[in-house]
Image: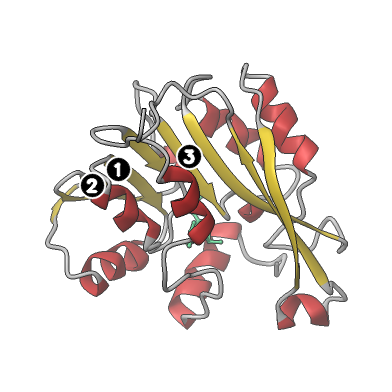
Amino acid sequence: MNKTITPLEYWSNVWTEGVIRFHQAQYNSQMTAYFNQFDLTNKTVLIPLAGKSKDILYFLERGAIVTAIEFCEQAVVDFFTENKIKFTKVGNCFKAKNLSFYACDFFNFHTDTSFDVLYDRASQVVFGKNDRPKYFDHVLNMVTSKSLILLFSVDHAGDPDYGPPFKIPKTEIMEAYKNKGITLTEESTTTEVGSEKMQAAGINTLITFTLKNPNPEITLTQS
Ligand SMILES: C[S@@+](CC[C@H](N)C(=O)[O-])C[C@H]1O[C@@H](n2cnc3c(N)ncnc32)[C@H](O)[C@@H]1O
């Protein structure tokens, strides 16, 4: 990241320039494979640092009540426009049936209740080592040891200061969750070739890993 701008200025530029390599045109297949097993009807779902992710639609289709947070207001507006969803705007919250999409810094989003489900794709990688404890603290105040949790994150062989995506050892995430009484397990790991930008920085492989809470309270679809 260019050290002369703040992280939020960096993300503003990403959205203004429209180079959003992280955005997926389809539902994330690992996400659907995992959550299809559970009955999400009327379950509350937290999606931090949501971008304009299509994955939000998946949870709405499954009957869940979704809260998403994204700093860049244009991304939030794009989500509604591109998916042809009507919304009303109350303060910084864009509302549609079963969806509250907040256009704000995640650290300015607060709630008194905890969520049944946390879906976290490519959020942790936004934060460098010094900022991650603050992120873990904040997100972990919104879940319990019974929440259904699916996290995707990455590690790579690059410099610890290279990012985003910042490299994160999975043990660091597991430790942060364990401190809050949540024991995550690793579901899978894949190794991919890094993006052209990463390759230019000497990073040729990207390790993507998936972590989940093995003891959620939510019932299985077929149970
Ligand atoms: C790597 S993208 C991932 C987006 C989404 N999770 C996805 O899977 O497509 C990270 C997103 O976090 C947003 N972001 C960065 N810092 C943020 C913050 N402090 N609060 C809220 N959103 C933030 C960026 O604007 C960007 O859209």
**As shown in the figure, which amino acid type bears the numbered disc 3?**
Phe
Outermost residue to the front = 222
Q: Residues within 10 Å of mark 1 (few under 14, many from 20)?
A: many
Where, by quadrant of the figure, is residue 4 drawn?
A: bottom right
The Cα atoms of the two marked residues, 1 and 3, are separated by: 18 Å
Quarter of the image with the C terminus in it: top left
The CA distance from mark 2 to mark 1 is 5 Å
Q: Residue at 30% x, 57% y: name it.
A: 57
For marks 3 and 2 on the same chain, the one whose residue lies earlier in the sequence: 2
Location of residue 106 with respect to 85 vertically, above or below: above
What percent of the width, then of the height, locates residue 134?
62, 34
Of the two numbered discs 2 and 1 on the same chain, state the one appearing first in sequence. 1
Question: Mark number for residue 66?
Answer: 1
Residue 180 seen in this snapshot: yes
Please state if 173 lies on the left or on the right of 10 as rendered.
right
Q: CA distance from mark 3 to mark 2?
A: 19 Å
Badge 1 marks a residue whose secondary structure is strand
Residue 146 or 141: which is nearer the viewer? 146
Where residue 178 appears, as percent x and y from the top left, is: 69, 22
- Identified by mark 2, the residue type is Leu
**Disc with the residue nearer the chain's start (1 vs 3):** 1
State whether label 1 is within 8 Å of ligand 1: no
Q: Which residue is mark 2?
A: 99
Answer whether residue 101 is visible to the viewer in this image: no
Q: Secondary structure at mark 3?
A: helix
User: In the rendered image, which residue does mark 3 sit on?
Assistant: 107
Q: Nearer the viewer, mark 3 or mark 2?
A: 2
Q: Of tags 1 and 3, which is closer to the observer? A: 1
- Circle 2 SS class: strand
Q: Is residue 187 left or right of residue 42?
A: right
